[in-house]
Image (cartoon, rainbow, N blue to C red):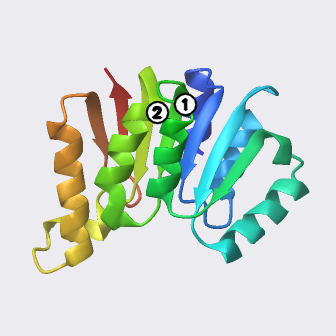
Amino acid sequence: MLNQFIIKLISAQKVLDIGVYTGASSLASALVVPPEGKVYSLEKSIKFAQIAQENFKKYEVSDRINLIIGDASKSLEHLCQEGHSGTFDFSYIDADKTNYPTYFNLSLQLLRQGGVLAVDNTLFKGKVFDLDNRVGQQIDNANKTFISSGAVDVLLLNIGDGYTLMRKR
């Protein structure tokens, strides 16, 4: 998985995973952070969080994952309030597409300088060019937010459904 390679490449010890679903990305991250590393996984669905927890236990990485259930925006704000700003090495966004700009801005607060932010589905099946597709347009606006922020170096890869990598300046 690309995230695992990046986490290893930057020697990340503290990872943020926004949008857990069944836990694959959190699990992959937990498998490559060092034993003292931590993955903060945010999921709004109790059902999916339970499935993810079962997968974490199966692969014996539960001790490396802090699963936070609830609205991701509020959870990210809470992490900032708890003093985690500037302490994360890597952040991965793959949650509800309409909130990508919010997750981006809050991730920036939580990432250290030089930290890496990755966002999935940034081409959204080519729908970012379809003016009649609401979600596609929201992702297109998020992509424009990333580029115009001035806070990150941006690389949009046209692999899969689009994968954007950013480095916090």
Amino acid beneath label 1: His
The structure residue drawn at horizontal position 37% and vertical position 34%, both measured from the top left corner, is 108
Amino acid beneath label 2: Leu
All told, the count of numbered labels is 2
The Cα atoms of the two marked residues, 1 and 2, are separated by 6 Å
Res 35 quadrant in image? top right
Where, quadrant-wise, is the N terminus in this rendering?
top right
- Image-based side of 162 in relation to 31, left or right: left
Q: Residue furthest front?
A: 81
The structure residue drawn at horizontal position 47% and vertical position 55%, both measured from the top left corner, is 74
Q: Secondary structure at mark 2?
A: helix
**Mark found first going from the N terminus, 1 or 2:** 1
* Residue 157 badge: none
Residue for badge 2: 110
Measured as percent of width and height from the top left, residue 32 is found at 72, 34
Front residue of 86 and 127: 86
Q: Are marks 1 and 2 in contact (CB under 8 Å)?
A: yes
Residue for badge 1: 84
Q: Is residue 85 above or below residue 129?
A: above
Measured as percent of width and height from the top left, residue 67 is found at 70, 53
Measured as percent of width and height from the top left, residue 145 is found at 19, 46
Front residue of 103 and 94: 103
Q: Residues within 10 Å of mark 2 (few under 14, many from 20)?
A: many
Measured as percent of width and height from the top left, residue 122 is found at 32, 56
Q: Is residue 97 above or below residue 63?
A: below
- Image-based side of 160 in relation to 26, left or right: left
Q: Residues within 10 Å of mark 1 (few under 14, many from 20)?
A: some
The structure residue drawn at horizontal position 84% and vertical position 64%, both measured from the top left corner, is 54
Q: Secondary structure at mark 1?
A: loop
- Image-based side of 121 in relation to 77, left or right: left
Work out whether residue 163 can be spotted. Answer: no
